[in-house]
Amino acid sequence: MKTLLIVDDNEQNLYMLEVLLSARGFKVEKAFNGFEALEKARRAPPDMIISDILMPVMDGFALCRSWRGDKKLKNIPFVFYTATYTEHEDENFALSLGADRFITKPIEPSKFLEIISRTLENFKTAEKTAPRKPLAENGFYKKYNAALFRKLEDKMLQLERVNHILENDVAERKQAEKILRESENKYRTLIENIPQKIYFKNKDSVYISCNLNYARDLKISPHEIAGKTDYDFFPEELADKYRADDKRIMGSGATAELEEIYVKDGVKSWVRTIKTPVSDKGILGIFWDITERKQADEERRKLEKQMIQNQKVESVGRLAGSIAHDFNNMLTVICSCAELALPQLAPEHPVYAYLKDIQTAANRSAELTKQLLTFARKQPARPKVLRLNDTVRNMLKILQLLIGENIKIVWNPGADLWPVKLDPSQVDQLLANLCLNARDAISGKGEIAIETGNAPLDAAAKRQNAIAPGSYVKISVRDNGCGMDKETLTHIFEPFFTTKRVGQGAGLGLATVYGIVKQNEGYINVLSKPGHGTTFEIYFPRNVAAAKTAKPEKAGASPGEARHGKETVLVVEDEPQLIKLIWMILESLDYKVLIAVTPGEAIRLAEKHTGPIHLLVTDLVMPEMNGLELSREILKRHPKIKSLFMSGHSPGLIGMKGFMEENADFIQKPYSIRDLAAKVREVLDRKQDAEREE
């Protein structure tokens, strides 16, 4: 037995339908409005719903839209049965909402039953190809309101006809009064029971009437609104705007759709309003709240902006990654050659100063490459659990030296700060860049305030600043400098963007800050106005895991002499100048050095060499095969050999590409002579320790 749910606020209509359908063998469930029907259907879905349109609480149109948007109900046939909405436009709207049939009253019972039976049968045999989708919000309200306006205009015309009868034909007064009462009742039911707010003003923007929903917003009774104006309910600026809109729309004679600010209980929200001039009598307005949609649009806009910034980061990352290898190879040669040459000259020698300048410039270039890789999030971080207050406090003296004595640093540490997991050197770099940026924004004497604190953020933070809810530790750097305008703020994290004069900055300071924050899954927010200074707010996720005791690092070479050795080292590097330099460095430290410029040559050397080879020092990115593949081939021929990998790429990038195993020994180019000597000795000593333990 099929179950039919019938919905109508008229008890007599429900009874007649129940008798008619029960006699045909259907089981009938009843509801007096759309809301009640939804509740019943969700508990026990029927085989079909037959609904009136004009009802209190939730009308038929709103019911149909909700029905088609419900996962449990969307594929159940929906039939409209109405005596109020009978025009062709009403039927088109109903079908666009997903209704299967639209039946207007009155209709012969046999014809009605035939339509119901056929609809059920067709639905049973029809292929369900695409899921039914509810009409989008904007489209729904546009058509919904159009239907409503048609009904209102019909009722107003009907009232005018009744008044004409009353004035001109006393004999028909009783009949006219009956029609008038019926029209007023239908009009009142229609207006009072739709979810939107409705008002009617005369041509001078004075309120004549409103529905109950609008009166509730204004905290008055509907009859109290007559004679009032917008100045009685809204701030003057808003009332001026509403009145200007009314005047413009009345003058044009055309319906207008607006998105505007609305104030309720002192709280501003966004509403979508449709205003329609009614001949020359006044203006009819209907509106509904769209604050959530506006907030969603704003959040989407912020996310799109963030995505564009991330794409810029990725583009520079690809650029940085592509040039880093060759650039760092050259820097290694320059730095090491200068380092080798300096001890051979007395400080007073005229060439000594030039070599020092070369060394300084090369080191600055190496730092620039690191900044690029950090910005692009390709520079590896070595995070550990920190108490951020201690890290910042240890940096204060250095920061004061960096920015000069004319600017005061104010330190405001937060109490009971949660731990965070960060690379301490990245925190130092972040603070240095922000303070240097603040210094450049301050003319003469000034102040930079550094502040920390715990920041538990809820969903509101995501709407305001696109920060995911959670527990964070916040560090802010505030200056009282010149501030920035909105246009500048949109570009500050872009690589190479700078407002400084040529030679005063590369435009990578704030880009590097952005890279550090994103690499550590944090968020950054900037507050600034011209003449009112700037505040950078940075949020790092709270570390909930207990801090692990760090293992002490094995001592490397002392700042003085590099440690020597007697082992045999096979060096593989496809850059001729660099391999010559490495050979000179290791030879000077008494190692026996074998060199190869290709992996194939290295394998042949390993096969021919009769004695042991203790260490393979190889570049990772080479023609023929990569460094990891080469080390595996050499290991087949010399099972006890250790490998030290080197590259101008960051280990994060090459590890991601599968060129290096986790925990492999690695040295980043460019490196100093002392760095290389210490790393070679460290790997060989570890090898000897392991052999002794065996």
Image (tube, rainbow, N blue to C red):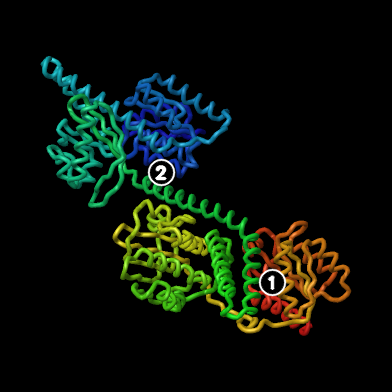
In this view of the protein, which residue sits in the foreground, 209 or 66? 209
> Would you say the residues marked 2 and 1 are in contact, meaning their CB atoms lie under 8 Å apart?
no
Q: CA distance from mark 2 to mark 1?
A: 66 Å
Q: Position of residue 477 (x, y in %)?
A: 38, 67
Residue hosting label 2:
39
In this view of the protein, which residue sits in the foreground, 651 or 596? 596
Query: Could you say which disc has been placed on residue 665 in the image?
Result: 1
Residue that appears at 35% across and 67% down? 478
Residue that appears at 58% across and 28% down? 125
Q: Position of residue 581 (x, y in %)?
A: 71, 70
Residue 359, picture quadrant: bottom right
Q: Position of residue 54 (x, y in %)?
A: 32, 31
Residue that appears at 18% across and 35% down? 209
Query: Could you say whether the residue bearing mark 1 is in a helix, strand or loop?
Result: loop
Tell me which amino acid carries mark 2: Glu
Q: Position of residue 678 (x, y in %)?
A: 67, 78
